[in-house]
């Protein structure tokens, strides 16, 4: 193997390149990235960049010297548009063709756009998105955030920190419904209310109204919210269109690129890492696809090793999923899965104190640990999730 192509210049792509070099690969690595920026960190976009507590100068994942040391053929501002596995080649949007012996698909995702062309309605996924929203904060006093997932919740918290009046809208009954059991999500609901957010839950958005510029958000229950600024956080669309017809299997259920336990796709020599990789996990009853910072790094490291192993010994990817979110100066952390859950128990602290660790169980086993303002205690229980720990065994480990 002398030629590796990495499609995607985000965190997963960068960590794959670093993993290859650390493993001794001295061949050519071509990294293709649709954005014109060198690889940068996305979590601060919805937090420090919006609140003014950070600068885009702090976003690059590596300084120029470290990136240059990887000796990459870096194709920024370019997009992969077609995979030709028979020729072992990737076509780019400028007409160039890049040959590979091994390929890593790390093209990630883009923000799902709301159904409107009105000015004043934003999404947040890229640096340019964050800069546009931050600039809008300076000229508007009121904002409606549509979608109470992680991005929406963080934008709402940042907007309140910046002094805006915030309305957070979601069709679900609690924030983070897809990721967090409602018994814990209810605490997060109150956390927003503690900070003055007007929550409109259980009613989705039916449309955006205005003349050229947004003036109000119409909800499915018939009510309307007057606003001249909206941020829509309705999830993502995966960047997999360029793989259609290539033989790489796409998953129509959980979405993304369907991989085996080693993160290899249905096309030999083509692996996937990051937001769009969909693989089987033996401890979570099916397949996983994680849009988490930690997953991008851990999966990319493993993909680099497995790609170089060829037909030799490879390692299955069986991580303990980990995610964190910072809201109102408080850290929310999740190990494993927090939904669906049969059983929820607060083993340290309490929801009333806004400081706790909650265990989440399913089928008699511990499947998740969620904490608010409890970092050391949360991380203490990671080994329990690395094994099939029974619910009773987990409670015993927590001294319950």
Image (cartoon, grey):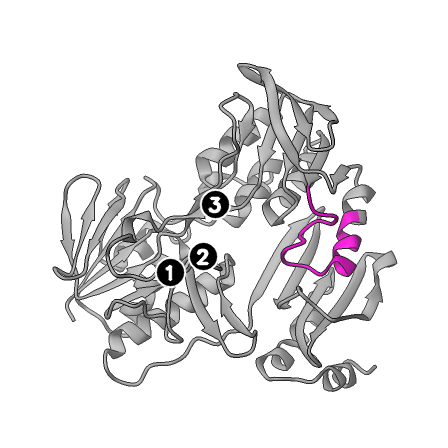
Q: Are marks 3 and 1 in contact (CB under 8 Å)?
A: no
Q: Position of residue 186 (x, y in %)?
A: 79, 53
Element under disc 2: loop
- Tag 1 secondary structure: strand
Residue 306, by quadrant, is bottom left
Left or right, 272 with reference to 167: left
Please determine whether, in this image, residue 365 is positioned above or below residue 368: below
Residue depicted at x 67% and y 31%? 144
Q: Residues within 10 Å of mark 2 (few under 14, many from 20)?
A: some
Label at residue 58: 3
Q: On the rendered structure, is 344 left or right of 25? A: right
Q: Position of residue 192 (x, y in %)?
A: 76, 44
Circle nearer the viewer, 3 or 1? 1
Looking at the picture, how far across and down is residue 370, in whole percent? 70, 65
Residue 266 position (above or below residue 206): below
Can you say which quadrant of the picture contains the C terminus? bottom right
Rendered position, 77 above or below 69: above
Determine whether the residue tagged by mark 3 lies in a helix, strand or loop: helix
Q: Residue 196 location in percent, x, y?
A: 80, 37
Kindly identify which numbered label has been placed on residue 255.
Answer: 2
Ranked by sequence position, the earlier of labels 3 and 2 is 3
223 vs 397: above or below: above
User: Magenta stretch containing residue 187, yes or no?
Assistant: yes
């Amino acid at each position: 193997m002398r030629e590796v192509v990495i499609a995607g210049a985000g965190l997963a792509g960068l960590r794959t390149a670093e993993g290859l070099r650390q493993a001794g690969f001295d061949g050519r690595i071509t990294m293709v990235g649709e954005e014109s920026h060198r690889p940068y960190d996305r979590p601060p976009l919805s937090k420090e960049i919006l609140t003014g507590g950070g600068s885009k100068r702090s976003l690059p994942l590596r300084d120029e010297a470290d990136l240059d040391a990887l000796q990459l053929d870096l194709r920024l501002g370019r997009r992969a548009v077609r995979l030709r596995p028979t020729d072992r080649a990737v076509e780019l949007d400028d007409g160039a063709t890049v040959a590979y012996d091994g390929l890593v698909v790390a093209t990630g995702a883009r923000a799902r756009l709301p159904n409107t062309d009105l000015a004043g309605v934003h999404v947040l996924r890229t640096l340019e998105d964050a800069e546009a929203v931050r600039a809008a904060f300076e000229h508007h006093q009121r904002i409606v955030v549509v979608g109470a997932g992680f991005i929406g919740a963080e934008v709402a918290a940042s907007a309140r920190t910046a002094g805006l009046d915030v309305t957070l809208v979601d069709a679900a009954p609690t924030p983070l419904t897809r990721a967090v059991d409602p018994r814990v999500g209810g605490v997060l609901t109150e956390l927003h209310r503690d900070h003055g957010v007007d929550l409109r839950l259980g009613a989705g958005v039916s449309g955006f109204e205005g003349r050229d510029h947004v003036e109000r958000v119409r909800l499915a229950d018939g009510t309307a919210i007057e606003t001249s600024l909206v941020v829509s956080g309705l999830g993502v669309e995966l960047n997999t269109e360029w793989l259609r017809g290539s033989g790489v299997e796409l998953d129509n259920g959980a979405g993304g690129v369907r991989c085996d336990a080693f993160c290899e796709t249905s096309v030999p020599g083509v692996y996937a890492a990051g937001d769009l990789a969909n693989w089987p996990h033996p401890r979570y009853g099916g397949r996983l696809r994680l849009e988490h910072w930690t997953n991008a790094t851990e999966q990319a490291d493993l993909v680099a090793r497995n790609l170089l192993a060829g037909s030799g010994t490879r390692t299955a990817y069986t991580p303990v999923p980990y995610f964190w979110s910072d809201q109102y100066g408080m850290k929310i952390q999740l190990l494993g899965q927090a939904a669906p859950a049969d059983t929820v128990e607060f083993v340290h602290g309490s929801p009333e104190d806004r400081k706790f660790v909650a265990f989440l169980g399913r089928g008699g086993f511990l499947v998740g640990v969620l904490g608010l303002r409890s970092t050391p205690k949360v991380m203490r229980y990671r080994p329990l999730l690395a094994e099939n720990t029974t619910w009773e065994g987990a409670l015993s480990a927590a001294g319950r």
